[in-house]
Image (cartoon, rainbow, N blue to C red):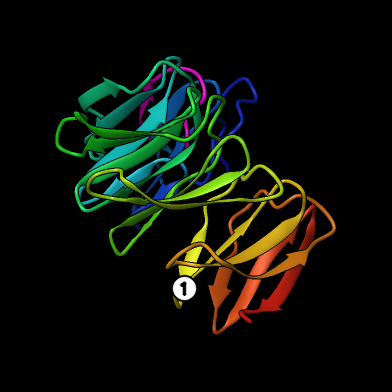
Amino acid sequence: WTFDTGDEALIGGAPAVDGRVVYAGTYSGDLFAIDVEDGEEIWSAEIGASVTAPALVDGVLYVAGGDPATMYAFDPENGDELWSAEYGGGTTYGAFAVADDNIYAANGDGTLYALSTEDGDELWTAELGNEDATGTPAVVDGVVYAAGPEDDFYALDAATGEELWSVQLDGTIYSQPVVADETIFVGDGEGTLYALATADGDELWTVRLDGPVEGSPVILDGVIYVDGNGTIYALGES
């Protein structure tokens, strides 16, 4: 089957799937719940511009969108809005991460926000720079790994937002970092894939690819799969 989002609206990131329903948002500001069996629309909600990839966690569907940036929580069964909360004054950039009852999201004011999954209340903020923060944060073992808008990469305490360390990379990061075996794997817009130590951000190695890395690496059985400008690379972890 196929599903028409209407007016050639582009999908705003990867959909979320629970085995029965596909949840997808569009850059036109719509959120759809689609039956996986036949592609029929179950429900839809109008949010605003630039709807990001949704996340389905513990029976709640979270999605960000609009201008100013707003986080939404929906009942995935019927599309009822549970709550919504603006965060910062910028627009929505990248997706967000949900971990340990918190939502971690960056937006166009160069700030990373930690919000409560219960009601969207702001728990803490961390300044990442003066421009748009474009990447999607990752949360592993109580640490938030996030890209700043000025080629900086940060490790923050997930509970408090305190900076643990930061490093300067060569280009802007658009994708979500991946963490495995105490190593962070992340690519930048200049075409470099980095392996950084989780302890202090020290550079373990880099690989130059043929084009910008805009998607997140995937690691399986010790092999890193990453896209560089339309070419798929398979690399060893070391």
The image shows residue 88, relative to residue 190, as above or below, that is: above
Image position of 218 with respect to 215: above or below: below
Residue 212 point in image, percent of width and height = 76, 49
- Residue type at mark 1: give it: Ala
Check disc 1 and report the residue beneath it: 180
Quick one: 12 or 152, which is closer to the camera?
Answer: 152
Residue 36 in view: no
Residue plotted at (57% across, 83% down): 222
State which region is magenta: 42-52
Residue 3's x, y, as percent?
Answer: 54, 37
Residue at (63% x, 52% y) in the render = 215
- Relative to residue 142, is residue 70 depicted above or below? above
Q: Nearer the viewer, residue 52 or 44?
A: 52
158 displayed left or right of 1? left
What is the quadrant of residue 122 in the picture?
Answer: top left
Task: Kindly state the secondary structure of the residue where label 1 is placed.
Answer: strand
Task: Point out the residue furthest to the right here.
Answer: 210
Which residue is rendered at x = 29% and y = 41% of the image? 103
Relative to 82, does residue 187 appear above or below in the rendering?
Answer: below
Q: Is residue 47 magenta?
A: yes
User: Which residue shows up at 35% across the image and 58% down it?
Assistant: 19
The answer to whether residue 110 is visible is yes
Q: Count every numbered label the image shows and give the total.
A: 1
Q: Quadrant of the C terminus?
A: bottom right
Q: Position of residue 16 (x, y in %)?
A: 41, 48
Image location of residue 129, percent across then percent down: 52, 31
Point out the residue furthest to the left here. 118
- Magenta span has 228? no
Whether residue 75 sits left or right of residue 176 in the image: it is left
Disc 1 residue crowd, few under 14, some 14–19, many 20+, Cα 10 Å: few
